[in-house]
Structures are given as structure tokens and as C-alpha cells.
Image (cartoon, grey):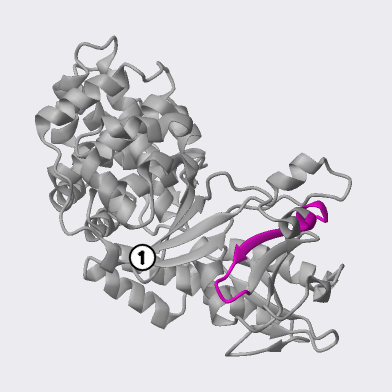
């Protein structure tokens, strides 16, 4: 276990004339915890079908009604996870929809067949209608819709138990729809370029790690990545069914029950009441005991503000320290001056946010060494953001593409996802070095040095685990952190 002080998210710059109370809030401190496979539980917390249904019935009474389950799911997960589709036209009409990062088109005829098969599924299993709310945004199924359909098919057996548990509710099908959409958007967070869950999603991830062994959570993520990969390339309903069956087998009913329970808990109380609802779940005592052994309290699950998945098959958790604020005169003074300590490392070095910039400061350096203005660094930051937005899988080198393809061929879809992220980072470094040739670029140590000022810069992806790792790797250097 690595225990470090940290802060998550984009800090607020607090000006000298700001309210003192607001200045103190800006000095909030966080603990950074890293969970590794060695700290994982050996066996999952068992959840039987009877306990599962009884708990669902109790939670369902607290779920607010909505006629827009998709938008509710987006709001709960705080993510704009919309499919990026490109329409291809022939003779004035759309003939196929092509995901911008996908090489397999979805022809118009396939879209019609998929919609027809979905209606048949609703008629057979759920009594008809738009049973999962997939037609809410239009008569054709989008990639978001197909991913949600794929998850629903993967959870088929457990959703039957869920529907049975909700049978005495006013609208059991609406509740099932909310569970599926929210589960889909939560899982999609792990497929973003930087897989980080925040706020309510972060609390859900902590609970998932408490109920399930870490290797099971990674298998869930890997299986979901494979399902999305296959669904995004599917051109028929049968292909989606086959991909969902594979995910269902890899996931297992127990993991599916835990996932549905946590999603329902999130729906019942939102971020504010999530931790208070957890004791209602079967196996809570065992899950809480495991979390306590890792220095985490399930009663404070709402204090987990971000969870990042790292390449070493670890999870980094940002946890707000109870009662934290301006815990010292130094912290309060820094806050009033517009300085926020983001991460304070055990070695005394720290990362601070000042003048709209993020800097790493060694233990033996004063904050006075940070320049009030850094126009070249500002140019680097703007360029890094712009370059990162241009990256796509087509930007990979032949060797990188081959490594990704081999990982997928072996069924290691999460590994393939991580390899793509690493390729994205190398792409940004390569393009930036070409654009800013006046800088001295280094293969080791700090990435770039401006010879005219001596200022040093490190390019890195903006995740909690990556920020923390860079602070340990180059602890003795003063440098500005250029994130993308």
C-alpha cells in the first residue's frame, strides 16, 4: 500500500481578495491510495438470488421515477459518453453509419434489421414496447444503443431476477431500463482514453473492489472492452447476441448480481446517499472488513472522488480526508495566495497549482522559484491539448498497431486498450518535439528544457496515478507539468 497526500480534479485558483473561507476550502487535502493485486481479496462476497431480490425490492422504493433513463444515467455518471458516428451518403440518402474510430460500417439495412430484432426481444422477454428505451432518441439504433443492448443481453438471466424483484412496483420495466443504462455508462467510463471514474462512479468502483477480487474486476473490465469492441463492429443482431453470450460467460452470475446491486444503489440515493445505502447490501460486513484492512471505510465511500486504473493492474484512489481543510497555517496562507497543493509526496516534494499552472517542486526548493509568468509553457500546454485531440488509432506506427492487434487476437482487450493509450502518449511527445525544436528534448529525466530560460517541462497524461508516478520518478527536479 502506498499512502500519499493528494487532491483530484482541476484546482481552483483563489485570488488574494477572495473570501477567507473560500481560501480554506481550496486547501482541502486528499489521501492517495494504491490497491495492488497483493492487497486483493481471495474470494468474492457471495450474493445469493434470494438476498439479491430482497435487497433490490428495498432499494427500488427509493428510486425516483423518470421517463428519460438515458439522460438520468448520463447525469449520474457525469460523462458525455456519446457515440461519434459519421454518416456516409449515396445519392442523397444515408447508406451507412461509420464510427470514426472503427473500420467496419453499419449499413442502413443492418440498422433496420437490428431495430426489428430489438422489438422482437422486447415482445418476447418484456411484454413489448421500447423495453430498454433505445428508441428515445430516434427510430434507428445508435452505437450507444447497441452497447446498452449488448449489456442487457449479457445480463439476461440476472435481469429476469431483477424484473421479478420489481414486479410489485408501479413500473418494473422502467426500473430495469434505468439499471441497464446506468450500468452501461458506468462501464463505458473505463474505455475513455484516460480510464478514471469520478464522484459517484468512483464510489461504485470502491464498492466493486470490496465485493469482488481484483482479478475479477479486471476480468469484468476486459470482458466489457471486448464486448464493446465486437458490438461496435457488429452488422447483425446475431453477432451482438454472440458477443453478449461470451461476456455473460466470462462475467458469471455472481459478478452480474453485484454489478446490478451497486447500480441500483446508485439510482436509489445518488452520490449523496450512496454510502448510506451500502449496509443494505448482502455481504456488507465482509466487504467493509476488507476495505478497513486497506485503510478505507465503506461508510466514507462518498469521499472517494476519483479512481484510476493503472497499467500495472492496480487502482489508484483519491480519498478526501475527513474534516480536511486548511489544516495548517502554511496551507491557509498558501490558499490565500492562490496556491493549492495537489499532491504532497512522502519525500517532501509536492505538486502545486499556481498562476493557472501545475508545477512539481522538490523538497529543497521554494515556491518562489516558480515564475509568475511562463508564456512558452502556456504555448506548450495549448499545443499538447490540441495535438492529443488529433490522435486516433490510425496514428499508431506499424509496430504499435501490431502489438494492439496481437493483444486483441489473444482476447486481451483491456491490454489492447492500454497499449493504445501508451501509443497516444508517444504520438503527443513526437509531434510536440517536432513543433518545438527550439527546446532540448531528453529521452530520460524531464522531457523538455527551454534553453533560453532554463525552465523544465514534463508531458504526461492527466490521471491521478500518472501524476503521482511522475512526482516519484523525478523527485529532485523543478518542472512544469504539461498535461493532456
Q: Which is nearer the eye, 115 or 454?
A: 454
Name the residue at 82% across, 40% down: 19
Q: Is residue 138 visible?
A: no
Q: Residue 167 lies in what quarter of the image?
A: top left
Count numbered badges in the picture. Answer: 1
Q: Which residues are magenta?
A: 333-348
Q: Is residue 2 shown above or below 152?
A: below
- Left or right of 334? Residue 292 is left
Q: Quadrant of the C terminus?
A: bottom right
Q: Is residue 204 shown above or below 179?
A: below
Instruction: Report x, y in % for residue 38.
Output: 27, 68
Name the residue at 26% across, 61% down: 40
Q: Is residue 238 shown above or below 396?
A: above
Instruction: Report x, y in % for residue 232.
Output: 34, 50
Name the residue at 37% across, 20% down: 63
Instruction: Report x, y in % for residue 32.
Output: 49, 60
**Residue 111 inside the magenta-drawn segment:** no
Q: Badge 1 is on which residue?
A: 314
Instruction: Report x, y in % for residue 390.
Output: 59, 64
Q: Quadrant of the N terminus?
A: bottom left
Amino acid at each position: 500500500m502506498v499512502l500519499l497526500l493528494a487532491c483530484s480534479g482541476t484546482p481552483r485558483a483563489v485570488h488574494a481578495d477572495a473570501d477567507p473561507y473560500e481560501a480554506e476550502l481550496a486547501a482541502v487535502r486528499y489521501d492517495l491510495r494504491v490497491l495492488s493485486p497483493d492487497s486483493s481479496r481471495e474470494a468474492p462476497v457471495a450474493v445469493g438470488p434470494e438476498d439479491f431480490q430482497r435487497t433490490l425490492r428495498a432499494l427500488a422504493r427509493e428510486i425516483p421515477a423518470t421517463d428519460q433513463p438515458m439522460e438520468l444515467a448520463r447525469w449520474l455518471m457525469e460523462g458525455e459518453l456519446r457515440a461519434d458516428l459519421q454518416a456516409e451518403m449515396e445519392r442523397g440518402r444515408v447508406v451507412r453509419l461509420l464510427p470514426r474510430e472503427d473500420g467496419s460500417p453499419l449499413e442502413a439495412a443492418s440498422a433496420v434489421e437490428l431495430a426489428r430484432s430489438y422489438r422482437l426481444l422486447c415482445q418476447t422477454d418484456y411484454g413489448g414496447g421500447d423495453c430498454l428505451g433505445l428508441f428515445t432518441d430516434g427510430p434507428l439504433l445508435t452505437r450507444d444503443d447497441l452497447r446498452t443492448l449488448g449489456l442487457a443481453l449479457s445480463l439476461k438471466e440476472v435481469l429476469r431476477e431483477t424484473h421479478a424483484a420489481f414486479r410489485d412496483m408501479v413500473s418494473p420495466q422502467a426500473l430495469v431500463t434505468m439499471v441497464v443504462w446506468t450500468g452501461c455508462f458506468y462501464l463505458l467510463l473505463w474505455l475513455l482514453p484516460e480510464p478514471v471514474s469520478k464522484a459517484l462512479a468512483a464510489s461504485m468502483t470502491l464498492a466493486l473492489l470490496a465485493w469482488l477480487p481484483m482479478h475479477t474486476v479486471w476480468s469484468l473490465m476486459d470482458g466489457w472492452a471486448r464486448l464493446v469492441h465486437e458490438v461496435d463492429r457488429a452488422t447483425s443482431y446475431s453477432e451482438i447476441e454472440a458477443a453478449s453470450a461470451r461476456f455473460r460467460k466470462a462475467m458469471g452470475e455472481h459478478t452480474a448480481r453485484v454489478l446490478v446491486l451497486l447500480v441500483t444503489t446508485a439510482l436509489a440515493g445518488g452520490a449523496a446517499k450512496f454510502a448510506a445505502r451500502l449496509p443494505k447490501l448482502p455481504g456488507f460486513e465482509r466487504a467493509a472488513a476488507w476495505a478497513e484492512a486497506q485503510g478505507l471505510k465503506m461508510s466514507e465511500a462518498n469521499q472517494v472522488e476519483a479512481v484510476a486504473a493503472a497499467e500495472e493492474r492496480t487502482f489508484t484512489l483519491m480519498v478526501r480526508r475527513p474534516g480536511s481543510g486548511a489544516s495548517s497555517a502554511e496551507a491557509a496562507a498558501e490558499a490565500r495566495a492562490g496556491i493549492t497543493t495537489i499532491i504532497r509526496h512522502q519525500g517532501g516534494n509536492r505538486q502545486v497549482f499556481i498562476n493557472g499552472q501545475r508545477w512539481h517542486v522538490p523538497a529543497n526548493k521554494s515556491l518562489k522559484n516558480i515564475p509568475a509568468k511562463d508564456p512558452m509553457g502556456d504555448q506548450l500546454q495549448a499545443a499538447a491539448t490540441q495535438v492529443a485531440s488529433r490522435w486516433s488509432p490510425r496514428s499508431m506506427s506499424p509496430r504499435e498497431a501490431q502489438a494492439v492487434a496481437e493483444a486483441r487476437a489473444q482476447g486481451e482487450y483491456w491490454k489492447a486498450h492500454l497499449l493504445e493509450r501508451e501509443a497516444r502518449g508517444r504520438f503527443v511527445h513526437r509531434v510536440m518535439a517536432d513543433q518545438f525544436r527550439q527546446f532540448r528534448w531528453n529521452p530520460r529525466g524531464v522531457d523538455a528544457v527551454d534553453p533560453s530560460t532554463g525552465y523544465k517541462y514534463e508531458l504526461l497524461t492527466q490521471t491521478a496515478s500518472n501524476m503521482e508516478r511522475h512526482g516519484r520518478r523525478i523527485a529532485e527536479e523543478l518542472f512544469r507539468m504539461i498535461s493532456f
